[in-house]
Amino acid sequence: MTWLVWRQHRIQYILGAALLAAFAVVIVIAGDQVAAQFHHAATTCAAGHGCEQLGGLFMGNKVVGFLVIATLGAPLIVGLFWGAPLVAAEVEAGTTQFAWMQSVTRKRWLTVKIGWMMLAATIWGAVISILVSWWSSPTNAEQLNQFDPGRFDLVGLVPVAYSLFAMALGIVSGALLRRTLPALAVTLAGFVGVRALVTLLLRPHYMSAVTTYYNVTRGFNPAGAFWSLSQGVLGPNGQPIAQINNVPYFDGIPQTTLPASCASAANGNGNPSGACVQALSHYRAFITYQPANRFWAFQGIEFGIFVVLAAALIAVTAAVLLRRDA
Amino acid sequence: MTPAITTTGLTKCYGKTAALNDCTITVPEGRISALIGPNGAGKTTLLKLLAGLSKPTAGQVTVNGSVPRQDPAFLAEIGYLAQEIPLYRRLSAEDHIRAGAHLNPRWDSASVRERLAALNIPLDRPVGKLSGGQRAQVALSLILGKRPRLLLLDEPVAALDPLARRNFLGTLTDGVAVGGLTVMLSSHLVTDMERVCDHIVMLSSSRVQLCGDIDDVLAEHKLLVGPRKDTTAIERDHYVVQVTRTPRQTTMLVRLNGPVHDPAFQVSDVSLEDIVLAYMGEDAPPARAAFTSVGDDQQ
Amino acid sequence: MLSFRVDGHSVVPPYLQIVQQVRQALRMGVLKLGDQLPTVREVVSETAINPNTVLKAYRDLEREGLVEARAGHGTFVRGLPPGPPPGTHSRLGRSLATWVREARAAGLDDESMEALLHTTMRATAEEEEIA
């Protein structure tokens, strides 16, 4: 049965390997470029010639932008081109009638086919993760939010889980719809929809966010590449202060609500007066965030979610195919 | 000798429609059975039930002594060829032979290659590029290479030209001549089947109309031609399949239950095709259950 | 090697056609005593008829005493059908061919020749009865 899977999907495997290789080549070239730019900016900064370049180095960089999009879409490719046709194309061509009448049971046929496909998805996701982790290491030094989709989704464990999910989604769509084109559409819509849902609605809540209160005059920044979920200032009544438009702010508070004594400090003339400090002490700033050191915990949770989803979809595929009239 | 196929009251419904209704047949071992019937009569449904590709809604079915199921031992003993001749179009005949070797416990690659070589069918060309007749031969040879005990073929020659049809049936009968093989093949062409088959199962409107050895069917059905007169006695003694009355003449196709006592009627043989047409005709009587041939009792 | 032809549209059942063709081959001398008949597989490959049909024909021939089946070896000619010795048919066939050529040259078509043959057969049979 393994022989048949390899012989039947030979071209797909070769194409897949070729695509991965091409992707790797692009990453290596771009990665070198990025690393060079980074080192140049880092030396400039260290030499005291200004570090602005470092901070904004990779914003708006077109190559980086393209690579991010390509990497986000890569897991979907296995779902569309390998997963969706796996069962659907065979049903359309009628070759299931051939396969299911050999002396292998339907169960074994399905197990071996799906097994190899999921392995391929795992390899695909792992290679992408390794390649992207390598080229993005300079950008990580910028200490920006590492839970951001442009970073979180590309490295670590999750690309593997996304690929497994996409593959499983493709397979189950093909098995249920029995036609390749509708299966492709469902896989595309399903993948994008579920990923968006998880990223936007679930990810912020994997673990209870940490809220830290601090003095408005002192300021506070959590360590490392943290994820800020919300921040603001609590007024003397303990409620978040009202946001007023078109007025200047001082330490996060609209000046119109502060005593006049703060005005000079607000304009940059010296330290706040005693009365101002007294007034400010009634305010508390807060930031609700996910700490940077939870990165791998979050990776693990999101990995688990998508792997469980993939397993459930495979179970549905098996249940449907093994019971269905041929 | 256990029959190759036995069904009792076999019924298959899709939603509210009965594709096959109360079907009871027996096919003894070693027969080449013709499954005859118009389109939509339930032929494909019956073949799929026999192969275990679908499950009955009601009734029993026994094939090669066991109930059809997803089991390597059962699957190894049967071969099923669907009407569309399902093969992997991009793979060559040789690829299919290797696949067969991997997927079946009993596999005779040599005989498959031999048959295809004798027919001048190239082994290394993708089967999608072969002609319809060649593809059918590849599919049949592959199934025979599995060394099954029962072959189920769904309209295998419908789309073939006469020469391809003859070659296909030649390969099939050769496979049976080797021994140990029972065949059921469906068709709506009776004349082809008469040459190759020695047993017939006739379906019409999802029901069995006839089931038995062709020799027995031919012996039992006669055409009675006589004057226009009262035929109650004949209708009581024998089973009348079809009656045509003109002002002067009565023509009846009957299934005999003993000799005909009325000397006014001339008794003559009927061709198998005419018998089948009579059962399929619009004025044919509704099918009676367990309509088996006398000869089967001796099996 | 004896080659069979089975006509699916004939009123004669296939097995009987085989029997008749074997008898004819014996009369014509195409098959001689001790010759092996084509195997079931050979006949079936050539004619695409049911193997049981061939078996039935060979069994009938065996009952008539014309052939015998030797297990594991095949079916062999054991006797000749009653009638004139082999060679008679070929001899008569040759003289018939001469007549046919003559008749055609004279302008008779196939239908006329067959009619003439049947009439003559009937007339001579009546003659023999009277005689």
Image: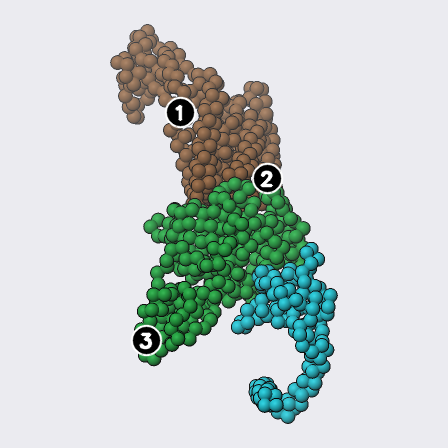
Chain colours: A brown, B green, C cyan
Q: Which mark identifies residue B229? A: 3
Q: Chain of mark 2?
A: A
Could you tell me residue B191's position as x and y percent? 51, 67
User: Camera-side residue: A254 or A237?
Assistant: A237
The answer to whether the residue labelled 2 contacts the one labelled 1, judged by CB atoms less than 8 Å apart, is no
Residue at image point 59% right, 44% down: B104
Task: Place residue B233 in its image quadrant.
Answer: bottom left
- Mark in the foreground, 2 or 3: 3
- Mark in the foreground, 3 or 1: 3
Mark 2 vs mark 1, CA separation in Å = 42 Å
- Mark in the foreground, 2 or 1: 2
Residue at image point 49% right, 37% down: A167
For mark 3, does the 10 Å Cα neighbourhood hold few (<14), some (14 to 19), or many (20 or more) residues?
A: few
Element type at marker 1? Answer: helix
* Residue position marked by numbered label 2 in the rendering: A2
Answer whether residue B203 is visible to the viewer in this image.
no
